[in-house]
């Protein structure tokens, strides 16, 4: 409830902020050009430079504001302003100067064209992002259908096995089958949780519902969840002494940390200790998840974030425990926050997966 | 024969109802079952269960409605079960007076632990002389002395400020239960406080630095991300 309310308020605040920002840019550039022209008047004998400088100003405004509106307004102000201030008679309007309509048209055309170009570029950028998201979604679906089918097969097989041969199977065998069912179901939960995270990103809006979270709380939550499943693995956390507030979707970042820690255990194979390190930089916060396991195979490393398909080519591929869905979900969550993620092997031993989040939205 | 706690399961899915009943009966609870809201509400009023397990998604009405209706006249422990993972549903259920929530999927041990905690709380609060501040609370190495307004960790006074003590005291009074951000802000700063919970976060960060050895691996006060805070169950 509170979050939605906050989101709506933030959105309208953001719109207001955008309008103010655009107006500010427009006024600033026009003001600067005017001041510069006044300054040049002290030295120049002609005033041919004035319209040129204003055309440049209008061009800049169209480039750095959103939409057509500000460029057109700026060109109108510039035309009238130049006429009023810089052409004879000074500080009076005179629309009968030769070539005046031409100046006006030229400025208007510049404003329109630059705005159109800028808008087009922005749209292309958006299309590209959309296509990237679509590709990720496809990769994810393929990975998921595999990740779900395998454990489901095992659960169904075990259950029907027990049902149909209840009297034939010994107590130990039955217990073993039931144990498998429980483990596979656990695995399914993990897959589904990851999927739900993705729907949070790809929900109705592309906007994440971020709010300022205290980093240690998120890490604490993730460690608690991890410890519930892997009580025998040690966890160490290293972070700056003062509290860090970072805008994020807390649930999603918690999910990323849990995924990374679980990956350390699943793929490190001999992992005994997972270490989370948080470092504060000037404009971002770094999160490192290190383990003392066997590290990541070099052949897999370049494709590690691409979903499970590419890594499937590799030899000795462990059918179920692939890194695919977990890591590609992590990557898309971090990307949606405006951050990035990298993976490498540590010199000594074990793997290190790191991601960073920007401190400002 | 011993007196068994009677638990009402309100759940529309047959297999989940069966599995909950099986584990509850195996653990010596009396079990009542309902699959619809209206039937459930009449069972609550006629049979007075000791605890209700309530699924929020029911065929004939929203589970939240039952929660609201029961809370008008009873403080009986209600454990909300929900497939909804969005934390705002949890927050809403807790703010409406649910004692705890458990998200599907869950295992047997988790469910039993939640039931035990909810029943214990209900009884403990009933036993307090006036249900208010007073006495001490001990949870692990943490001691809250409500008479002196002091909090000790491993015997050493941690010097909390007024508001910090109020927060820790409140969490201690409901130790083991999640208190939502809104509830805490309302109780400590009053109803007119800005809904922005930053002030609460900052206070909690300071408290954590005084109470916990490592703030990122807390021992006493835990965060339920997006929902609220919970203190360690008392000894």
Image: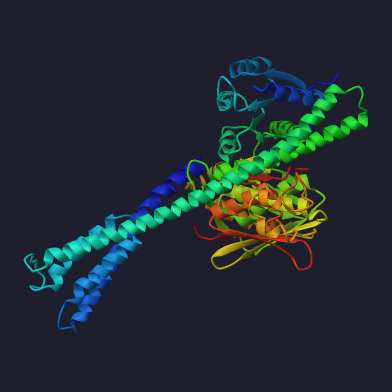
The residue lying toward the viewer, choosing from A10 and B73, is: A10
Residue A88, by quadrant, is bottom left
Quarter containing the N terminus of chain B = top right
Residue B4 visible: yes
Is A92 left, or right, of A23 in this rendering?
left
**Image location of residue A182, percent across then percent down:** 79, 35
**Lateral position of residue A47 relative to residue B128, left or right:** left
The answer, for residue B191, to whether it is visible in the render is no
Q: How is the image coloured?
A: rainbow
Q: Nearer the viewer, residue B128 or A345?
A: A345
Q: Position of residue A315 (x, y in %)?
A: 77, 53
Q: Residue at x 80, y 30 (%)?
A: A157
Question: Number of marks in the image?
Answer: 0
Residue A48's place in the image compared with A221, above or below, is below
**Farthest residue in the bottom direction?**
A43
Q: Is residue B54 above or below residue A100?
A: above
User: B150 or A309: which is nearer to us?
Assistant: A309
Look at the image and tell me in which quarter the C terminus of chain B lies. top right
Q: Residue at x 71, y 18 (%)?
A: B32
Q: Quadrant of residue B123?
A: top right
Q: Position of residue A158 (x, y in %)?
A: 82, 30
User: Is A140 left or right of A154, judged from the image as shown?
Assistant: left
Quarter location, residue A149: top right
- Depicted B121 relative to depicted B182: above or below: above
Give the left or right position of residue B13, taking residue A41 as reference: right
The image shows residue A49 at horizontal and vertical percentages of 20, 76
């Amino acid at each position: 409830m509170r979050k939605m309310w906050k989101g709506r308020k933030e959105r309208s605040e953001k719109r207001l902020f955008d309008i103010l920002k655009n107006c500010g840019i427009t006024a600033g550039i026009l003001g600067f050009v005017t001041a510069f022209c006044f300054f040049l008047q002290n030295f120049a004998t002609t005033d041919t430079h004035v319209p040129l400088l204003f055309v440049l100003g209008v061009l800049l405004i169209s480039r750095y504001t959103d939409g057509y509106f500000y460029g057109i307004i700026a060109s109108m102000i510039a035309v009238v302003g130049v006429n009023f201030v810089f052409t004879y008679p000074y500080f009076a309007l005179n629309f009968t100067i030769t070539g005046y309509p031409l100046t006006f048209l030229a400025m208007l055309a510049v404003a329109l064209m630059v705005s159109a170009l800028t808008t087009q570029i922005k749209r292309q950028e958006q299309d590209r992002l959309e296509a990237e998201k679509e590709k990720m979604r496809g990769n994810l679906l393929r990975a998921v259908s595999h990740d779900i089918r395998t454990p489901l097969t095992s659960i169904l097989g075990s259950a029907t096995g027990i049902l149909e041969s209840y009297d034939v199977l010994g107590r130990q065998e039955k217990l073993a089958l039931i144990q498998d069912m429980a483990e596979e179901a656990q695995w399914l939960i993990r897959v589904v949780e990851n999927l739900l995270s993705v729907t949070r990103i790809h929900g109705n809006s592309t906007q994440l519902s971020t709010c300022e979270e205290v980093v240690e709380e998120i890490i604490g939550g993730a460690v608690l969840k991890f410890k519930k499943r892997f009580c025998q693995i040690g966890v160490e956390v290293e972070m700056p002494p003062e509290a860090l507030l970072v805008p994020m979707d807390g649930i999603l970042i918690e999910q990323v940390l849990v995924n990374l820690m679980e990956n350390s255990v699943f793929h490190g194979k001999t992992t005994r200790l997972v270490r989370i390190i948080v470092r504060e930089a000037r404009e971002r916060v770094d999160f490192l998840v290190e383990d003392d396991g066997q590290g990541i195979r070099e052949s897999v490393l370049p494709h590690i974030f691409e979903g499970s398909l590419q890594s499937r080519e590799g030899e000795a591929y462990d059918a179920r425990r692939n890194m695919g869905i977990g890591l590609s979900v992590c990557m898309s969550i971090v990307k949606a926050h405006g951050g990035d993620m990298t993976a490498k092997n540590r010199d000594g031993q074990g793997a290190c997966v790191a991601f960073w989040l920007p401190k400002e939205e | 024969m011993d007196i068994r706690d009677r638990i009402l399961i309100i759940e529309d899915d047959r297999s989940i109802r069966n599995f909950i009943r099986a584990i509850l009966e195996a653990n010596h609870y009396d079990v009542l079952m309902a699959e619809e809201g209206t039937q459930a509400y009449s069972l609550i009023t006629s049979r007075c269960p000791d605890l209700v397990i309530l699924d929020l998604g029911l065929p004939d009405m929203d589970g939240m409605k039952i929660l609201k209706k029961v809370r008008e006249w009873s403080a009986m422990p209600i454990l909300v079960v929900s497939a909804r993972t969005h934390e705002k549903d949890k927050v809403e259920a807790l703010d409406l007076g649910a004692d705890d929530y458990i998200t599907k999927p869950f295992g047997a041990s988790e469910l039993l632990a939640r039931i035990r905690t909810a029943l214990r709380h209900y009884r403990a609060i009933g036993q307090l002389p006036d249900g208010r501040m007073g006495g001490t609370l001990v949870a692990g190495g943490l001691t809250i002395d409500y008479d002196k307004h002091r909090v000790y960790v491993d015997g050493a006074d941690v010097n909390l400020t007024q508001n910090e003590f109020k927060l820790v005291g409140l969490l201690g009074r409901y130790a083991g239960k999640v208190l939502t951000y809104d509830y805490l802000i309302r109780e400590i700063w009053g109803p007119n406080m800005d809904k922005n919970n930053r002030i609460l976060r900052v206070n909690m960060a300071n408290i954590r630095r005084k109470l916990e050895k490592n703030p990122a691996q807390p021992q006493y006060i835990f965060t339920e991300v997006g929902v609220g805070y919970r203190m360690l169950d008392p000894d």
